Amino acid sequence: MIIWINGPFGAGKTTLSGILARRVPDALVVDPEVLGYAFGRLVPAGPTGDFQDLPIWRSLTRYTLGEVRRLYRVPVIVPMTLVVPGYVEQIIGGLAAAGEWVLHVFLDADAEVVRARIRDQAVLDGTVQDDEVRRWRLAQVNRCLAARATMPAGTLMLDCGRLPPDELADEVIAHLPAPPGD
């Protein structure tokens, strides 16, 4: 089982993933952003500078998640903003087509709630780069929130501006398959 937590920056993907990791037995949190940083050092950056635009990142993210599932046989929680429809289909759809059970969750909120959260975040532990990352994330809010309209059928839409993280986790867990033997 793969639980993909999607949504804009500042929606609470990391917080929700941490709660789910404590509540879903044996779950691992796998953040594909780590692969993105690695590829940023290994291959030439794409024209946009966004590692998600690198075909190698998308294919190896899908492959890595499949391999984690195959080798460790545990639930995998993925906190990652993924809003380009073709990329969603390539990665999440590709995992499902390969036989993985995937719950795709999109955390939604009012744009001002998301912007306030981004402004309040310490992204890189207070470094100078914090401001650069914050500016970039703020510039993505409208694009990320607009993506809610393009999410595939079956996506679990949750209002992270209305529900606290523990209640969001309750909603996600309510949509998981029953453990074998139940």
Image (tube, grey):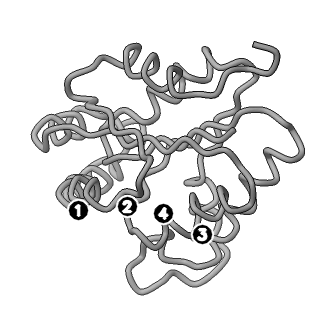
Is residue 136 in sight in this rendering?
Answer: no
Report the residue marked by disc 4.
88
Q: Mark 4 vs mark 3: which is more N-terminal? A: 3
Q: Amino acid at mark 3?
A: Arg
Gap between marks 1 and 2, in whole Å? 8 Å
Q: Residue 143's mark?
A: 1
Other residues around mark 2 within 10 Å, as few (<14) / some (14–19) / many (≥20): many
- Identified at 57% across, 70% down, the residue is 90
Gap between marks 4 and 2, in whole Å? 7 Å
Report the residue marked by disc 3.
58
Gap between marks 3 and 1, in whole Å? 19 Å
Q: Are marks 1 and 2 in contact (CB under 8 Å)?
A: yes
Gap between marks 1 and 4, in whole Å? 15 Å
Front residue of 133/182: it is 182
Gap between marks 3 and 2, in whole Å? 13 Å
Secondary structure type for disc 2:
loop
Secondary structure type for disc 4:
helix
Q: Amino acid at mark 1?
A: Arg
Q: Are marks 3 and 1 in contact (CB under 8 Å)?
A: no
Q: Mark 3 vs mark 2: which is more N-terminal? A: 3
Secondary structure type for disc 1:
helix
Say how many tags the image has: 4
Front residue of 40/115: it is 115
Q: Is residue 171 left or right of residue 180?
A: left
Q: Residue lying furthest right in this view?
A: 71
Gap between marks 4 and 3, in whole Å? 9 Å
- Identified at 49% across, 69% down, the residue is 87
Location of the N terminus by quadrant is top right
Q: Residue lying furthest left in this view?
A: 112
Report the residue marked by disc 2.
83
